[in-house]
Image (cartoon, rainbow, N blue to C red):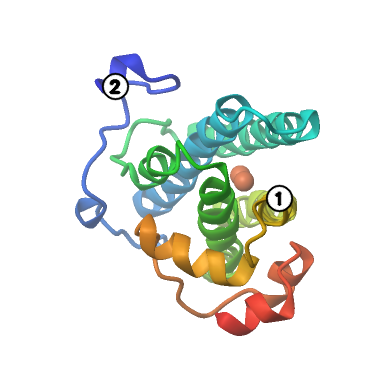
Amino acid sequence: MPNAALPGRPCRPELIHPARVPRRSPFKPEGLAALLHAIAHIEFNAINLALDAAWRFDGMPREFHLDWLHVAAEEAHHFSLLREHLQSLGHDYGDFPGHDNLWSMCERTADDVTARMALVPRTLEARGLDASPLIQDKLRKVGTPAALRAVDILDIILRDEIGHVAIGNHWYRWLCAREQVDPVAHYATLVVRHDAPKLHPPFNMEARRRAGFDEAELGRL
Ligand SMILES: [Fe+2]
Ligand SMILES: [Fe+2]
């Protein structure tokens, strides 16, 4: 489908293969801006993903749709915080290239709400829980006011993302109960079926527990 037919697809940033997205050191101003841009791009995609979950799937309770509208509003807030910070550094959203990995998982799970819950909130967003403390540690080492402002924004994002993963866990379990499948075993099947990214340590176990993963799921990591 051409980009013009998709919602929420500005002509910038340029979308390139993930391996081609340049890695820059956040110890340089341009690198810090690129890092903020990369996170802003994730949040921008997350708005689209949450809205897609809110409208695409029939036969779900009203609360499901309301939950994903609530998530979309929080993702828009995250994007705005990062964009404002980028603008304060003389940049804007669209200034750096990005990749399309998140939206592609949205497309791959468009006909299976259980797979969507398993692989978007419970996998991709949960990966954000793991990544946040590592990025924050690095930004604290950079130590400039701009980097420390980014640490504060990431605190807000992490707090809200625990809620998003919790919503994913809630509805994934609800769907597994309806389909009478075991949540842990079914997750492994869905990862293979939809070619989901492999998870790597270190894991943010505390955040994952607060987001509702049980010990069996955490043990599988
Ligand atoms: Fe977010
Ligand atoms: Fe999120």
Q: Which percent across, then down, holds residue 116?
A: 53, 46
**Residue situated furthest top in the rendering:** 4
Disc 1 packing (10 Å; few <14; some 14–19; many ≥20)? few
| Mark in the foreground, 1 or 2 | 1
Q: Which badge, 1 or 2, is on the more N-terminal residue?
A: 2
- CA distance for labels 1 and 2: 35 Å
Residue at the front extreme, as displayed = 180
Q: Residue at 53% across / 80% down in the picture? A: 202
Circle 2 residues within 10 Å: few <14, some 14–19, many ≥20: few
Q: In this view, does 18 lie above or below 10?
A: below
Residue shown at 45% from the left, 36% from the top: 110
Is there any visible trace of residue 56 in the rendered image? yes
User: Where, quadrant-wise, is the C terminus in this rendering?
Assistant: bottom right
Does the beta carbon of the residue at mark 2 sit less than 8 Å from ligand 1? no
**Residue 110 in the image: above or below residue 159:** above
What type is the residue that disc 2 sits on? Asn
Q: Are discs 1 and 2 less than 8 Å apart at CB?
A: no
Identify the amino acid type marked 1: Arg
Q: Which residue is drawn at 72% across and 80% down?
A: 215
Name the residue tied to disc 2: 3
The answer to whether 117 appears left or right of 103 in the picture is: right
**Quadrant of the image occupied by residue 187:** bottom right
Residue 182 picture location, percent across and down: 64, 67
The residue closer to the viewer here, 34 or 12, is 12
- Given residues 204 and 32, the one toward you in this image is 204
The percent position of residue 125, horizontal first and vertical second, equals 57, 54
Query: Residue 85 is drawn in which quadrant?
Result: top right
Residue 88 shows in the view: no
Q: Residue at 26% across / 23% down in the picture?
A: 1
Q: Where's residue 127, x and y in %?
A: 53, 62
> Which of the numbered marks, if any, corresponds to residue 178?
1
